[in-house]
Amino acid sequence: MEGEAHKALEPLWKAKNPLLVPIRAVMDLWNERNLIRLLVKRDFTSRYRRAGLGVGWAILEPLLLAAVYTFIFQILVGTDRFAYPLLVFIGAMFWRLFSTVLSSSSNSLIASRNLFQFARVPKSIFAASSAVMAFQMAFLSMVSILPFMWYYDLSVTWAYLMIPIWLGLTALVAWSMGLLLAPVATKIPDIMHGIRFLLRVGFFLSPVMWTYDMFGRRFGDGWLAALVQCNPTIVPITEVRSILLSEPTGIPPLGYQVFVAVSALSFIFGTIAFDTRAHKAVIHA
Amino acid sequence: MSIVLKCEQVSVAYPLPRKFRKLNAKPAGVHDVSFELGEGEVLGIIGKNGSGKSTLLKMLAGIFPPDQGEILMRGSVSLLSGVGVGFNGELTGRENCYLYGALMGRTKEQIDTLIDEVKAFSELEHFFDRPLRMYSSGMKSRLGISVATAFRPDILLIDEVLGVGDASFREKSKKRVRGLIDGSGSVIIVSHSLAMMASICSRVMVMDDGKAAFIGAPEEALAFYSSDFNDLNQD
Protein backbone atom coordinates (compact mmCIF):
# COMPACT_ATOMS: atom_id res chain seq x y z
CA MET A 1 0.00 0.00 0.00
CA GLU A 2 2.79 2.40 0.90
CA GLY A 3 4.36 1.89 -2.48
CA GLU A 4 1.06 2.76 -4.10
CA ALA A 5 0.48 5.92 -2.05
CA HIS A 6 1.08 8.21 -4.99
CA LYS A 7 -0.64 6.09 -7.61
CA ALA A 8 -3.71 7.60 -9.20
CA LEU A 9 -7.14 6.16 -8.52
CA GLU A 10 -8.35 3.85 -11.25
CA PRO A 11 -11.92 3.12 -12.32
CA LEU A 12 -13.15 -0.18 -10.90
CA TRP A 13 -15.10 -0.85 -14.09
CA LYS A 14 -13.09 -0.04 -17.18
CA ALA A 15 -14.48 0.17 -20.71
CA LYS A 16 -13.33 -2.88 -22.68
CA ASN A 17 -12.72 -3.39 -26.36
CA PRO A 18 -15.35 -5.99 -27.29
CA LEU A 19 -13.12 -7.37 -30.04
CA LEU A 20 -10.55 -8.45 -27.44
CA VAL A 21 -13.12 -10.15 -25.18
CA PRO A 22 -12.79 -13.65 -26.77
CA ILE A 23 -9.00 -13.51 -26.28
CA ARG A 24 -9.43 -12.37 -22.68
CA ALA A 25 -11.92 -15.20 -22.09
CA VAL A 26 -9.19 -17.69 -23.00
CA MET A 27 -6.68 -15.87 -20.77
CA ASP A 28 -9.19 -15.96 -17.88
CA LEU A 29 -9.45 -19.74 -18.25
CA TRP A 30 -5.68 -20.05 -18.06
CA ASN A 31 -5.23 -17.59 -15.18
CA GLU A 32 -7.98 -19.22 -13.12
CA ARG A 33 -6.93 -22.82 -13.81
CA ASN A 34 -6.38 -23.47 -10.09
CA LEU A 35 -9.93 -22.35 -9.26
CA ILE A 36 -11.33 -24.43 -12.15
CA ARG A 37 -9.42 -27.45 -10.81
CA LEU A 38 -10.86 -26.91 -7.32
CA LEU A 39 -14.41 -26.45 -8.63
CA VAL A 40 -14.11 -29.62 -10.71
CA LYS A 41 -12.78 -31.48 -7.68
CA ARG A 42 -15.71 -30.18 -5.63
CA ASP A 43 -18.27 -31.37 -8.19
CA PHE A 44 -16.50 -34.69 -8.73
CA THR A 45 -16.27 -35.35 -4.98
CA SER A 46 -19.89 -34.35 -4.40
CA ARG A 47 -21.04 -36.75 -7.06
CA TYR A 48 -18.91 -39.81 -6.34
CA ARG A 49 -17.46 -39.72 -2.80
CA ARG A 50 -20.39 -41.61 -1.31
CA ALA A 51 -21.25 -43.78 -4.35
CA GLY A 52 -20.31 -47.47 -3.99
CA LEU A 53 -19.07 -47.72 -7.58
CA GLY A 54 -17.53 -44.27 -7.37
CA VAL A 55 -16.11 -43.04 -10.64
CA GLY A 56 -17.14 -46.35 -12.23
CA TRP A 57 -20.52 -44.71 -12.89
CA ALA A 58 -18.85 -42.39 -15.39
CA ILE A 59 -18.00 -45.50 -17.45
CA LEU A 60 -21.08 -47.57 -16.71
CA GLU A 61 -23.75 -44.96 -17.37
CA PRO A 62 -23.04 -44.30 -21.08
CA LEU A 63 -22.55 -48.04 -21.63
CA LEU A 64 -25.98 -48.81 -20.16
CA LEU A 65 -27.54 -45.99 -22.15
CA ALA A 66 -25.95 -47.27 -25.36
CA ALA A 67 -27.28 -50.77 -24.62
CA VAL A 68 -30.81 -49.42 -24.15
CA TYR A 69 -30.67 -47.19 -27.25
CA THR A 70 -29.28 -50.04 -29.37
CA PHE A 71 -32.01 -52.38 -28.17
CA ILE A 72 -34.79 -49.84 -28.82
CA PHE A 73 -33.50 -48.77 -32.24
CA GLN A 74 -32.92 -52.30 -33.48
CA ILE A 75 -36.41 -53.33 -32.39
CA LEU A 76 -38.07 -50.25 -33.91
CA VAL A 77 -36.09 -49.88 -37.14
CA GLY A 78 -33.75 -52.80 -37.48
CA THR A 79 -30.28 -52.17 -38.87
CA ASP A 80 -27.43 -54.29 -40.13
CA ARG A 81 -24.88 -51.46 -39.77
CA PHE A 82 -21.47 -52.86 -38.73
CA ALA A 83 -20.57 -52.21 -35.06
CA TYR A 84 -23.88 -50.44 -34.51
CA PRO A 85 -23.75 -50.67 -30.65
CA LEU A 86 -20.32 -48.98 -30.71
CA LEU A 87 -21.65 -46.21 -32.96
CA VAL A 88 -24.58 -45.66 -30.59
CA PHE A 89 -22.20 -45.60 -27.62
CA ILE A 90 -20.11 -42.85 -29.26
CA GLY A 91 -23.24 -40.90 -30.17
CA ALA A 92 -24.68 -41.22 -26.65
CA MET A 93 -21.40 -40.18 -25.04
CA PHE A 94 -20.97 -37.09 -27.24
CA TRP A 95 -24.60 -36.09 -26.89
CA ARG A 96 -24.37 -36.45 -23.12
CA LEU A 97 -21.29 -34.22 -23.12
CA PHE A 98 -22.89 -31.59 -25.35
CA SER A 99 -26.23 -31.46 -23.51
CA THR A 100 -24.64 -31.48 -20.03
CA VAL A 101 -22.26 -28.64 -20.86
CA LEU A 102 -24.92 -26.58 -22.65
CA SER A 103 -27.48 -26.85 -19.84
CA SER A 104 -24.99 -26.33 -16.97
CA SER A 105 -23.32 -23.45 -18.78
CA SER A 106 -26.67 -21.73 -19.46
CA ASN A 107 -27.65 -22.24 -15.82
CA SER A 108 -24.26 -21.23 -14.37
CA LEU A 109 -25.20 -17.69 -13.30
CA ILE A 110 -28.29 -18.96 -11.48
CA ALA A 111 -26.62 -22.04 -9.96
CA SER A 112 -23.61 -20.08 -8.63
CA ARG A 113 -25.51 -17.03 -7.42
CA ASN A 114 -24.50 -17.57 -3.77
CA LEU A 115 -20.82 -17.47 -4.79
CA PHE A 116 -21.33 -14.09 -6.49
CA GLN A 117 -21.98 -12.65 -3.01
CA PHE A 118 -18.24 -12.35 -2.55
CA ALA A 119 -16.30 -14.01 -5.39
CA ARG A 120 -14.21 -11.62 -7.46
CA VAL A 121 -13.33 -13.98 -10.27
CA PRO A 122 -14.47 -13.99 -13.90
CA LYS A 123 -18.03 -15.29 -13.89
CA SER A 124 -17.43 -17.49 -16.94
CA ILE A 125 -15.20 -19.70 -14.74
CA PHE A 126 -18.22 -21.38 -13.16
CA ALA A 127 -19.54 -22.40 -16.58
CA ALA A 128 -16.04 -23.51 -17.58
CA SER A 129 -15.66 -25.75 -14.53
CA SER A 130 -18.83 -27.66 -15.39
CA ALA A 131 -17.59 -28.00 -18.98
CA VAL A 132 -14.24 -29.38 -17.79
CA MET A 133 -16.02 -31.78 -15.43
CA ALA A 134 -18.24 -33.09 -18.25
CA PHE A 135 -15.19 -33.40 -20.52
CA GLN A 136 -13.36 -35.46 -17.90
CA MET A 137 -16.37 -37.74 -17.49
CA ALA A 138 -16.62 -38.25 -21.24
CA PHE A 139 -12.88 -38.90 -21.46
CA LEU A 140 -13.08 -41.47 -18.67
CA SER A 141 -15.99 -43.21 -20.35
CA MET A 142 -13.80 -43.75 -23.43
CA VAL A 143 -12.42 -46.74 -21.51
CA SER A 144 -15.66 -48.46 -22.48
CA ILE A 145 -14.67 -48.66 -26.13
CA LEU A 146 -11.99 -51.26 -25.31
CA PRO A 147 -14.39 -54.26 -25.18
CA PHE A 148 -16.01 -53.04 -28.42
CA MET A 149 -12.59 -52.87 -30.08
CA TRP A 150 -11.82 -56.42 -29.01
CA TYR A 151 -15.24 -57.70 -30.12
CA TYR A 152 -15.18 -55.98 -33.53
CA ASP A 153 -11.44 -56.57 -34.00
CA LEU A 154 -10.64 -52.88 -34.47
CA SER A 155 -7.04 -51.74 -34.58
CA VAL A 156 -5.58 -48.69 -32.85
CA THR A 157 -4.26 -45.94 -35.14
CA TRP A 158 -2.61 -42.54 -34.60
CA ALA A 159 -5.95 -41.00 -35.49
CA TYR A 160 -7.17 -42.05 -32.03
CA LEU A 161 -5.25 -39.06 -30.67
CA MET A 162 -7.87 -36.87 -32.32
CA ILE A 163 -10.67 -38.26 -30.12
CA PRO A 164 -9.91 -36.02 -27.07
CA ILE A 165 -9.66 -33.04 -29.43
CA TRP A 166 -13.14 -33.72 -30.82
CA LEU A 167 -14.41 -34.14 -27.26
CA GLY A 168 -12.81 -30.81 -26.31
CA LEU A 169 -14.28 -29.04 -29.34
CA THR A 170 -17.75 -30.37 -28.52
CA ALA A 171 -17.45 -29.09 -24.93
CA LEU A 172 -16.11 -25.73 -26.16
CA VAL A 173 -19.02 -25.18 -28.57
CA ALA A 174 -21.59 -26.13 -25.91
CA TRP A 175 -19.84 -23.86 -23.34
CA SER A 176 -19.90 -20.94 -25.79
CA MET A 177 -23.58 -21.45 -26.60
CA GLY A 178 -24.31 -21.64 -22.86
CA LEU A 179 -22.48 -18.34 -22.28
CA LEU A 180 -24.71 -16.73 -24.88
CA LEU A 181 -27.84 -17.94 -23.07
CA ALA A 182 -26.77 -17.61 -19.40
CA PRO A 183 -27.43 -13.84 -18.94
CA VAL A 184 -30.83 -14.19 -20.64
CA ALA A 185 -31.72 -17.16 -18.43
CA THR A 186 -31.35 -15.02 -15.28
CA LYS A 187 -33.90 -12.51 -16.62
CA ILE A 188 -36.30 -14.99 -18.22
CA PRO A 189 -36.47 -18.25 -16.21
CA ASP A 190 -38.54 -19.84 -19.02
CA ILE A 191 -35.34 -20.00 -21.07
CA MET A 192 -34.07 -22.94 -19.00
CA HIS A 193 -37.32 -24.84 -19.59
CA GLY A 194 -36.97 -24.06 -23.32
CA ILE A 195 -33.38 -25.32 -23.34
CA ARG A 196 -34.37 -28.57 -21.61
CA PHE A 197 -37.09 -29.11 -24.22
CA LEU A 198 -34.75 -28.31 -27.12
CA LEU A 199 -32.16 -30.72 -25.74
CA ARG A 200 -34.76 -33.48 -25.69
CA VAL A 201 -35.64 -32.71 -29.31
CA GLY A 202 -31.95 -32.31 -30.16
CA PHE A 203 -31.29 -35.86 -29.03
CA PHE A 204 -33.35 -37.15 -31.97
CA LEU A 205 -31.97 -34.53 -34.39
CA SER A 206 -28.38 -35.49 -33.52
CA PRO A 207 -26.65 -38.65 -34.75
CA VAL A 208 -27.01 -40.63 -31.54
CA MET A 209 -29.12 -43.56 -32.76
CA TRP A 210 -28.58 -42.85 -36.47
CA THR A 211 -25.44 -42.19 -38.48
CA TYR A 212 -24.62 -39.60 -41.12
CA ASP A 213 -24.60 -42.19 -43.90
CA MET A 214 -28.02 -43.51 -42.78
CA PHE A 215 -29.31 -39.94 -43.04
CA GLY A 216 -27.71 -39.49 -46.48
CA ARG A 217 -29.32 -42.68 -47.80
CA ARG A 218 -32.74 -41.63 -46.49
CA PHE A 219 -32.80 -37.89 -47.34
CA GLY A 220 -30.05 -37.38 -49.97
CA ASP A 221 -27.80 -34.33 -49.90
CA GLY A 222 -30.30 -31.53 -50.53
CA TRP A 223 -31.32 -28.61 -48.33
CA LEU A 224 -32.23 -30.93 -45.45
CA ALA A 225 -28.65 -32.21 -45.33
CA ALA A 226 -27.36 -28.61 -45.33
CA LEU A 227 -29.73 -27.79 -42.47
CA VAL A 228 -28.65 -30.83 -40.44
CA GLN A 229 -25.00 -29.79 -40.84
CA CYS A 230 -25.77 -26.70 -38.70
CA ASN A 231 -26.06 -29.14 -35.78
CA PRO A 232 -22.61 -28.83 -34.13
CA THR A 233 -22.63 -32.44 -32.93
CA ILE A 234 -22.75 -33.96 -36.43
CA VAL A 235 -19.09 -33.46 -37.33
CA PRO A 236 -17.49 -34.55 -33.99
CA ILE A 237 -19.66 -37.68 -33.64
CA THR A 238 -19.20 -38.72 -37.26
CA GLU A 239 -15.46 -38.00 -37.14
CA VAL A 240 -14.89 -40.14 -34.04
CA ARG A 241 -16.98 -42.98 -35.46
CA SER A 242 -14.93 -42.89 -38.66
CA ILE A 243 -11.68 -42.86 -36.65
CA LEU A 244 -12.74 -45.98 -34.74
CA LEU A 245 -13.93 -47.87 -37.82
CA SER A 246 -11.18 -46.47 -40.10
CA GLU A 247 -13.68 -45.39 -42.73
CA PRO A 248 -14.46 -42.04 -44.40
CA THR A 249 -17.01 -39.73 -42.75
CA GLY A 250 -18.94 -38.95 -45.93
CA ILE A 251 -19.39 -35.36 -44.76
CA PRO A 252 -18.82 -32.89 -47.64
CA PRO A 253 -16.39 -29.94 -47.21
CA LEU A 254 -19.41 -27.66 -46.71
CA GLY A 255 -20.30 -29.64 -43.59
CA TYR A 256 -16.87 -28.93 -42.07
CA GLN A 257 -17.07 -25.26 -43.06
CA VAL A 258 -20.48 -24.96 -41.39
CA PHE A 259 -19.10 -26.64 -38.24
CA VAL A 260 -16.12 -24.26 -38.09
CA ALA A 261 -18.40 -21.24 -38.68
CA VAL A 262 -20.96 -22.31 -36.03
CA SER A 263 -18.17 -23.03 -33.51
CA ALA A 264 -16.30 -19.76 -34.13
CA LEU A 265 -19.43 -17.60 -34.09
CA SER A 266 -20.71 -19.29 -30.92
CA PHE A 267 -17.39 -18.65 -29.20
CA ILE A 268 -17.05 -15.02 -30.32
CA PHE A 269 -20.66 -13.98 -29.67
CA GLY A 270 -20.98 -16.15 -26.55
CA THR A 271 -17.95 -14.65 -24.82
CA ILE A 272 -18.84 -11.08 -25.85
CA ALA A 273 -22.50 -11.40 -24.80
CA PHE A 274 -21.52 -12.96 -21.49
CA ASP A 275 -18.84 -10.36 -20.76
CA THR A 276 -21.14 -7.42 -21.43
CA ARG A 277 -24.24 -8.78 -19.72
CA ALA A 278 -23.25 -11.24 -17.00
CA HIS A 279 -22.34 -8.62 -14.38
CA LYS A 280 -25.75 -7.02 -14.63
CA ALA A 281 -27.46 -10.39 -14.90
CA VAL A 282 -26.15 -11.27 -11.43
CA ILE A 283 -28.64 -8.75 -10.02
CA HIS A 284 -31.49 -10.82 -11.50
CA ALA A 285 -30.05 -14.20 -10.43
CA MET B 1 -4.59 11.49 4.19
CA SER B 2 -4.60 10.20 0.62
CA ILE B 3 -7.83 8.94 -0.92
CA VAL B 4 -7.96 5.20 -1.74
CA LEU B 5 -11.59 4.95 -2.82
CA LYS B 6 -13.91 7.47 -4.41
CA CYS B 7 -17.58 6.87 -5.07
CA GLU B 8 -19.11 9.44 -7.41
CA GLN B 9 -22.91 9.69 -7.70
CA VAL B 10 -23.28 5.94 -7.83
CA SER B 11 -26.72 4.47 -8.53
CA VAL B 12 -28.03 1.01 -9.23
CA ALA B 13 -31.62 -0.21 -9.31
CA TYR B 14 -32.85 -3.77 -8.81
CA PRO B 15 -35.29 -4.64 -11.57
CA LEU B 16 -38.90 -4.70 -10.47
CA PRO B 17 -41.07 -7.72 -11.22
CA ARG B 18 -43.63 -6.90 -13.89
CA LYS B 19 -46.62 -6.91 -11.53
CA PHE B 20 -45.01 -4.16 -9.42
CA ARG B 21 -44.14 -1.98 -12.39
CA LYS B 22 -47.82 -1.17 -12.94
CA LEU B 23 -48.05 0.11 -9.35
CA ASN B 24 -45.31 2.69 -10.02
CA ALA B 25 -43.30 1.16 -7.16
CA LYS B 26 -39.82 2.63 -6.69
CA PRO B 27 -37.07 0.08 -7.46
CA ALA B 28 -34.81 -0.87 -4.57
CA GLY B 29 -31.09 -0.25 -4.83
CA VAL B 30 -28.65 2.61 -4.32
CA HIS B 31 -29.37 6.14 -5.49
CA ASP B 32 -26.82 8.86 -6.12
CA VAL B 33 -24.32 7.95 -3.38
CA SER B 34 -21.03 9.87 -3.20
CA PHE B 35 -18.24 9.60 -0.64
CA GLU B 36 -14.48 9.20 -0.29
CA LEU B 37 -12.44 6.79 1.81
CA GLY B 38 -9.03 7.83 3.06
CA GLU B 39 -6.04 5.58 3.63
CA GLY B 40 -6.22 3.96 7.07
CA GLU B 41 -9.80 5.14 7.57
CA VAL B 42 -12.61 2.94 8.95
CA LEU B 43 -15.96 3.98 7.51
CA GLY B 44 -19.11 2.51 9.06
CA ILE B 45 -22.41 2.18 7.22
CA ILE B 46 -25.63 1.88 9.18
CA GLY B 47 -29.26 1.87 8.09
CA LYS B 48 -32.47 -0.09 8.15
CA ASN B 49 -32.80 -3.44 6.41
CA GLY B 50 -33.20 -2.84 2.67
CA SER B 51 -31.60 0.60 2.77
CA GLY B 52 -28.93 -0.40 0.22
CA LYS B 53 -25.91 -1.06 2.48
CA SER B 54 -25.05 -4.53 1.15
CA THR B 55 -25.80 -3.49 -2.44
CA LEU B 56 -23.32 -0.63 -2.11
CA LEU B 57 -20.65 -3.00 -0.72
CA LYS B 58 -21.18 -5.44 -3.58
CA MET B 59 -20.63 -2.65 -6.11
CA LEU B 60 -17.50 -1.53 -4.29
CA ALA B 61 -16.28 -5.14 -4.30
CA GLY B 62 -16.69 -5.26 -8.08
CA ILE B 63 -19.42 -7.91 -8.04
CA PHE B 64 -21.68 -5.84 -10.28
CA PRO B 65 -21.25 -2.38 -11.82
CA PRO B 66 -23.37 0.69 -11.04
CA ASP B 67 -26.02 1.82 -13.53
CA GLN B 68 -24.73 5.37 -13.16
CA GLY B 69 -21.77 7.06 -11.54
CA GLU B 70 -18.21 5.86 -11.12
CA ILE B 71 -16.14 4.01 -8.52
CA LEU B 72 -12.43 4.83 -8.43
CA MET B 73 -9.92 3.02 -6.22
CA ARG B 74 -6.38 1.79 -5.84
CA GLY B 75 -5.11 -1.38 -4.20
CA SER B 76 -6.75 -4.77 -3.65
CA VAL B 77 -10.30 -5.01 -2.35
CA SER B 78 -12.03 -7.91 -0.66
CA LEU B 79 -15.56 -8.42 0.65
CA LEU B 80 -16.23 -10.35 3.83
CA SER B 81 -19.84 -11.43 3.54
CA GLY B 82 -22.01 -14.43 4.33
CA VAL B 83 -19.81 -16.67 6.47
CA GLY B 84 -19.67 -20.21 5.07
CA VAL B 85 -21.15 -19.25 1.69
CA GLY B 86 -19.77 -21.48 -1.03
CA PHE B 87 -18.75 -24.29 1.30
CA ASN B 88 -19.40 -27.83 0.13
CA GLY B 89 -20.50 -30.62 2.49
CA GLU B 90 -18.48 -33.37 0.79
CA LEU B 91 -15.17 -31.48 0.90
CA THR B 92 -13.05 -31.39 4.05
CA GLY B 93 -12.51 -28.19 6.01
CA ARG B 94 -9.05 -27.87 4.47
CA GLU B 95 -10.36 -28.38 0.90
CA ASN B 96 -13.11 -25.83 1.53
CA CYS B 97 -10.49 -23.31 2.68
CA TYR B 98 -8.54 -23.71 -0.56
CA LEU B 99 -11.72 -23.34 -2.60
CA TYR B 100 -12.83 -20.25 -0.66
CA GLY B 101 -9.39 -18.68 -0.97
CA ALA B 102 -9.36 -19.27 -4.74
CA LEU B 103 -12.81 -17.72 -5.01
CA MET B 104 -11.45 -14.68 -3.18
CA GLY B 105 -8.83 -14.44 -5.93
CA ARG B 106 -5.91 -15.86 -3.88
CA THR B 107 -3.23 -18.10 -5.31
CA LYS B 108 -2.52 -21.58 -3.97
CA GLU B 109 0.81 -20.36 -2.55
CA GLN B 110 -0.92 -17.55 -0.64
CA ILE B 111 -3.40 -20.01 0.85
CA ASP B 112 -0.58 -22.46 1.71
CA THR B 113 1.01 -19.83 3.96
CA LEU B 114 -2.26 -19.17 5.81
CA ILE B 115 -3.79 -22.63 6.14
CA ASP B 116 -2.15 -23.53 9.47
CA GLU B 117 -3.27 -20.24 11.00
CA VAL B 118 -6.84 -20.87 9.77
CA LYS B 119 -6.80 -24.35 11.30
CA ALA B 120 -5.49 -23.06 14.62
CA PHE B 121 -7.97 -20.17 14.84
CA SER B 122 -10.96 -22.37 13.97
CA GLU B 123 -10.08 -24.79 16.84
CA LEU B 124 -11.42 -27.64 14.67
CA GLU B 125 -8.33 -29.84 15.18
CA HIS B 126 -8.82 -33.28 13.55
CA PHE B 127 -12.22 -32.22 12.17
CA PHE B 128 -10.35 -29.86 9.85
CA ASP B 129 -9.57 -32.82 7.58
CA ARG B 130 -13.02 -34.37 7.71
CA PRO B 131 -15.93 -33.70 5.33
CA LEU B 132 -17.96 -30.63 6.22
CA ARG B 133 -21.17 -32.68 6.43
CA MET B 134 -19.81 -34.08 9.72
CA TYR B 135 -19.63 -30.58 11.25
CA SER B 136 -22.18 -28.99 13.55
CA SER B 137 -23.53 -25.60 12.43
CA GLY B 138 -21.28 -23.91 15.01
CA MET B 139 -18.22 -25.67 13.61
CA LYS B 140 -19.13 -24.56 10.07
CA SER B 141 -19.39 -20.98 11.30
CA ARG B 142 -15.99 -21.24 12.99
CA LEU B 143 -14.42 -22.46 9.78
CA GLY B 144 -16.23 -19.73 7.81
CA ILE B 145 -15.08 -16.82 9.96
CA SER B 146 -11.56 -18.27 10.25
CA VAL B 147 -10.97 -18.51 6.51
CA ALA B 148 -12.85 -15.33 5.64
CA THR B 149 -10.74 -13.23 8.00
CA ALA B 150 -7.42 -14.83 7.03
CA PHE B 151 -6.71 -12.54 4.06
CA ARG B 152 -5.62 -8.92 4.44
CA PRO B 153 -6.49 -6.70 1.48
CA ASP B 154 -5.74 -2.98 1.00
CA ILE B 155 -9.44 -2.14 1.20
CA LEU B 156 -11.54 -4.44 3.34
CA LEU B 157 -15.33 -4.49 3.06
CA ILE B 158 -17.17 -6.20 5.93
CA ASP B 159 -20.87 -6.98 5.73
CA GLU B 160 -22.31 -8.05 9.11
CA VAL B 161 -20.38 -11.25 9.73
CA LEU B 162 -19.76 -11.13 13.46
CA GLY B 163 -22.87 -12.78 14.87
CA VAL B 164 -21.85 -16.43 14.40
CA GLY B 165 -20.75 -19.18 16.79
CA ASP B 166 -21.13 -19.37 20.55
CA ALA B 167 -20.53 -16.40 22.87
CA SER B 168 -16.82 -17.05 23.41
CA PHE B 169 -16.17 -17.59 19.69
CA ARG B 170 -18.16 -14.42 18.86
CA GLU B 171 -15.89 -12.44 21.16
CA LYS B 172 -12.84 -14.09 19.61
CA SER B 173 -14.19 -13.26 16.14
CA LYS B 174 -14.68 -9.62 17.07
CA LYS B 175 -11.08 -9.42 18.24
CA ARG B 176 -9.98 -11.09 15.03
CA VAL B 177 -11.92 -8.59 12.89
CA ARG B 178 -10.50 -5.71 14.90
CA GLY B 179 -7.03 -7.14 14.22
CA LEU B 180 -7.95 -7.46 10.55
CA ILE B 181 -9.10 -3.84 10.51
CA ASP B 182 -5.81 -2.78 12.09
CA GLY B 183 -3.88 -4.86 9.55
CA SER B 184 -5.79 -3.62 6.49
CA GLY B 185 -5.22 -0.28 4.82
CA SER B 186 -8.81 0.98 4.87
CA VAL B 187 -12.10 -0.54 5.92
CA ILE B 188 -15.78 -0.10 5.19
CA ILE B 189 -17.95 -1.97 7.66
CA VAL B 190 -21.70 -2.58 7.64
CA SER B 191 -23.15 -3.57 10.98
CA HIS B 192 -26.20 -3.19 13.19
CA SER B 193 -23.92 -3.21 16.23
CA LEU B 194 -24.01 0.54 16.90
CA ALA B 195 -21.72 0.41 19.96
CA MET B 196 -19.03 -1.32 17.94
CA MET B 197 -19.46 1.13 15.06
CA ALA B 198 -19.02 4.05 17.48
CA SER B 199 -15.86 2.54 18.92
CA ILE B 200 -14.01 1.52 15.74
CA CYS B 201 -15.17 3.86 12.95
CA SER B 202 -13.61 7.19 12.11
CA ARG B 203 -16.73 8.21 10.16
CA VAL B 204 -20.20 6.70 9.81
CA MET B 205 -22.62 6.94 6.90
CA VAL B 206 -26.35 6.55 7.49
CA MET B 207 -28.22 5.05 4.55
CA ASP B 208 -31.93 5.46 4.05
CA ASP B 209 -33.93 4.26 1.07
CA GLY B 210 -30.79 3.78 -1.03
CA LYS B 211 -29.42 7.25 -0.35
CA ALA B 212 -26.61 8.50 1.87
CA ALA B 213 -28.76 10.44 4.34
CA PHE B 214 -25.84 11.49 6.55
CA ILE B 215 -22.09 11.09 6.66
CA GLY B 216 -19.90 12.41 9.44
CA ALA B 217 -18.48 11.76 12.90
CA PRO B 218 -19.75 8.54 14.55
CA GLU B 219 -21.54 10.27 17.46
CA GLU B 220 -23.37 12.67 15.12
CA ALA B 221 -24.27 9.86 12.73
CA LEU B 222 -25.65 7.68 15.51
CA ALA B 223 -27.64 10.64 16.88
CA PHE B 224 -29.01 11.28 13.37
CA TYR B 225 -29.90 7.61 13.00
CA SER B 226 -31.54 7.43 16.43
CA SER B 227 -33.58 10.58 15.90
CA ASP B 228 -34.73 9.61 12.44
CA PHE B 229 -35.59 5.98 12.97
CA ASN B 230 -37.76 4.88 15.86
CA ASP B 231 -37.24 1.22 15.08
CA LEU B 232 -33.48 1.26 15.33
CA ASN B 233 -31.84 -1.94 16.42
CA GLN B 234 -30.47 -1.79 19.92
CA ASP B 235 -26.99 -3.16 20.30
Image (tube, rainbow, N blue to C red):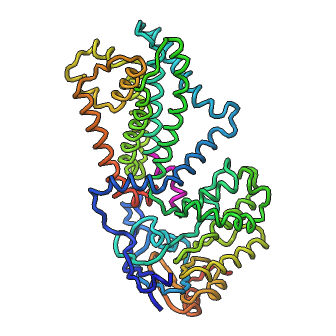
Task: Give residue B206's position: percent from left, percent from top.
Answer: 52, 83
Region of the chain picked out in magenta, as a range: A106-118
Q: Residue A98 appears in which quarter of the rendering?
A: top left
Task: Give residue B14's position: percent from left, percent from top.
Answer: 42, 64
Can the viewer see residue B53?
yes
Q: Residue A265 appears in which quarter of the rendering?
A: top left
Residue at position x 59%, y 56% in the image:
B99
Magenta segment includes A254 = no
Classified by dominant secondary structure, the portion drawn in magenta counts as helix
User: Looking at the image, which is closer to me, B95 or B189?
Assistant: B95
User: Looking at the image, which is closer to me, B76 or B210?
Assistant: B76
Residue at position x 28%, y 36% in the image:
A260
Residue at the left extreme, as displayed: A222
User: Looking at the image, which is closer to me, B161 or A9?
Assistant: A9
Would residue A199 be found to the left or right of residue B206 on screen?
left
Would residue A101 be found to the left or right of residue A216 on screen?
right
Can the viewer see residue A98?
no
Residue at the front extreme, as displayed: A158
Would residue B153 be found to the left or right of residue B22 on screen?
right
Q: Residue B80 appears in which quarter of the rendering?
A: bottom right
Would residue B191 be found to the left or right of residue B137 on screen?
left
Does residue B9 lie above or below A217 as drawn?
below
Q: How many marks?
A: 0
User: Looking at the image, which is closer to me, B81 or B51?
Assistant: B81
Task: Give residue A163's position: percent from left, percent from top.
Answer: 43, 30
Residue at position x 50%, y 47% in the image:
A129
Task: Give residue A72's position: percent from left, percent from top.
Answer: 48, 13
Does residue A15 lie above or below B225 as drawn?
above
Residue at position x 40%, y 25% in the image:
A240
